[in-house]
Image (tube, helix red, strand yellow):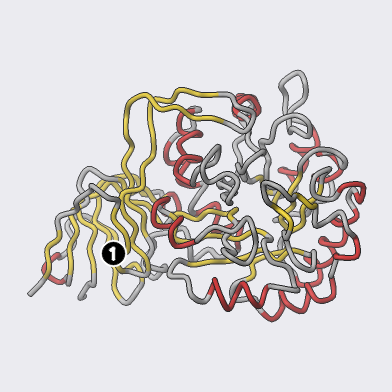
Amino acid sequence: MAFDLILAGGHVIDPSQNIDGIADVAFAGGKVAAVGRNLQRANAASVRDVTGHIVTPGLIDLHTHVYVHGTSLGIDADEFCRTSGVTTAVDTGSAGPGNFAGFRKHVIEHAQSRILAYLHVSHAGIYGFSERVMVGESEEMRLMNPIEAVEVADANRDVIVGIKVRVGKHSSGTSGVAPLDIALQVAEEVAMPLMAHIDHPPPSYEEVVSRLRPGDILTHAFRPFPNAPVTPQGTVKQVVLAARDRGVLFDIGHGKGSFSFKVARAMLANGFMADTISSDVHTLCINGPAFDQVTTLSKFLCLGVPLPEVIAATTVNAAKALRRTELGSLRPGSPGDATILTIAEGRFDYVDVVGEHLEGDRRIISDAVVLGGRWWHTREGVSFPETISA
């Protein structure tokens, strides 16, 4: 079989196939063609030597905001994906039914990276989010637009993967759980999962989590007090354990205000790891404290989560949450996306959203990205020797 590209000699970590060892990864026709030792390199148009690096399925960031120039919180998806090793950026509610057409036409269809989206139940999505203006889109009930949300979600099933709602003091004000209940009706109508944001009460963590269905996602799952998932005694709240038992998924969604080392340590000490790790990257946290996806992943590595579990939380687990199981895998026939990483050792400073610093001894660095079976991006200063067939 002729290959377009082989990544040769890397340490492949693909939790979807329980692969954790040295192997080659070959691509053809935009898809993964083969994974194995000593693939026939003479049959490849291009061979990249990735010896000493880690090769994973293309990373999925399950919580981003990439409606660049369309909302004040949007960042450029391709720029972010190149530097963070992400091949699939999932926008979570930047656009609602009133402006999703613009998001699709001007951003999603022009991006080289893959963009999927949760559609906000609020008419214009997250429209008032900046340093100077902060308007909770779920606070104004007149903006709830369930009928058109159903129509738009149904018409864009190729890129819309679920429904988004934000509730809490900053996003729904005194509306409490009412926006959540409306969003759940929309999600039920279109047979899609719901992703729920939670910030300060009201409503309480318990009120939100108790309403979520199997397959729904609570993002900001390790947020600090108030509305943390742990009790004052450091145990996991019973409502959280009950939600996991019935199939609710828990996503990190780091962002500007939604990840605490203290809470993470307590949850991990109780054996409760989030299902997915995501950055919630946007204009107000891309320069800290979230920075990017690999920094968010590094925090969990330094908190003691084994590397294969960290990789699973941004590949196969994220793909399952999206119900797009063709993603997040290097299984032959899967989309030809891969991320090439290095684990640097040293002393690295990490910060959470409340200002606590953690000195870690390792850092995950994105060195290169393969997108659609083609070499897409190389980190400045890194070289991967290439052999090109005549």
Give the SS element for disc 1.
Answer: strand
Return the residue found at the far top: 233
What amino acid is at disc 1? Trp
Residue at 87 percent across and 47 percent down: it is: 173
Vertical position of residue 197 compared to residue 327: above or below: above
Front-most of residues 19 and 140: 140
Vertical position of residue 179 compared to residue 366: above or below: below
Q: Is residue 322 left or right of residue 148?
A: left
Q: How many numbered marks does the figure carry?
A: 1
Residue 366: x and y, percent? Answer: 36, 47
Residue 185: x and y, percent? Answer: 85, 65
Residue 198: x and y, percent? Answer: 76, 45
Residue 43: x and y, percent? Answer: 15, 72
> Would you identify the image quadrant in which residue 322 lies?
bottom right
Front-most of residues 44 and 253: 253
Vertical position of residue 380 compared to residue 109: above or below: above
Residue of label 1 = 375
Q: Is residue 285 left or right of residue 141?
A: left
Quadrant assignment for the C terminus: bottom left
Number of residues whose C-alpha sits closer than 10 Å to that of mark 1, classed few (under 14), some (14–19) or many (20 or more) = some
Residue at 65 percent across and 62 percent down: it is: 71
Q: Is residue 296 left or right of residue 119?
A: left
Front-most of residues 373 and 245: 373
Quadrant assignment for the N terminus: bottom left
Residue at 59 percent across and 72 percent down: it is: 159
Return the residue found at the far bottom: 155
